[in-house]
Image: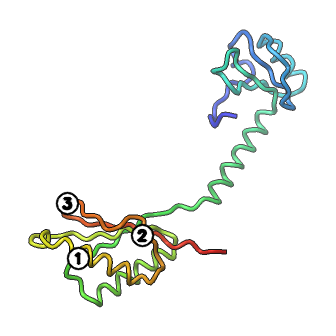
Amino acid sequence: MDRRENYEVNERIRDGEVRLLGSDGEMIGVMSSGDALQRAYDEGLDLVMISPTAKPPVCKIMDYSKYKYEQSKKTKEMKKNSTVVEVKEIRLSMTIDVGDIAVRTKQCLRFLEQGDRVKVSLRMRGRENAYAAQCVKVLNDFYDGLEGKAVQDKKPTVEGKIITMMLSPVKQQG
């Protein structure tokens, strides 16, 4: 079935002929929309257009309110089971001290334990642009300090005055 919310139901179906599917999913055949609607009413169910682009359009006999209820339950369940992965950012500088690196490493590990991805960026200022290789070394040393608790999605890359790398948590086996 389509993922659209608004289906054409019962009297809202304006097409002359429709291809009809029974309530159990069997193909009944092509007939006028009035006859199809009468069959649905005889069964105490609704006539729902499930494929309006087909020639002729495909309609199915079903309990529409029950179908909508089941769809809303499915979407709620999918939302409940899904996890939102955020991207957190940690900024470093070329002249960062050992103590500051330790603080940033602890912060990064906390983000990774929560399941978030981490973007580590280093902005070069002034004369630091001439020493981009040293800045990349700072980022690599930061990654080595994470002791294998992160995976590099994107290696350190220079983009203008900013060098970035992306980290994600290591997948647990089990």
Q: For this view, does 88 lie left or right of residue 76?
A: left
In the rendered view, does 95 fall on the left or right side of 44?
left
* Amino acid carrying mark 2 in the image: Gln
Instruction: Give the percent coordinates (x, y) of residue 163.
Output: 26, 66
In this view of the protein, which residue sits in the foreground, 34 or 165?
Answer: 165
Disc 3 packing (10 Å; few <14; some 14–19; many ≥20):
few
Q: Residues within 10 Å of mark 1 (few under 14, many from 20)?
A: some
Residue 68 percent across, percent down from the top left: 72, 39
Instruction: Measure the C-alpha gap from mark 1 to mark 3.
Output: 15 Å
Q: What residue did someone put label 3 on?
A: 160
Q: How is the image coloured?
A: rainbow
Q: Secondary structure at mark 3?
A: loop
The amino acid on which the numbered mark 3 sits, given as a three-letter code, is: Gly
Q: Which residue is mark 1?
A: 93
Give the residue at the far bottom of this rendering. 99
Does 163 appear above or below 4? below
**Tag 2 and tag 3, C-beta contact below 8 Å:** no
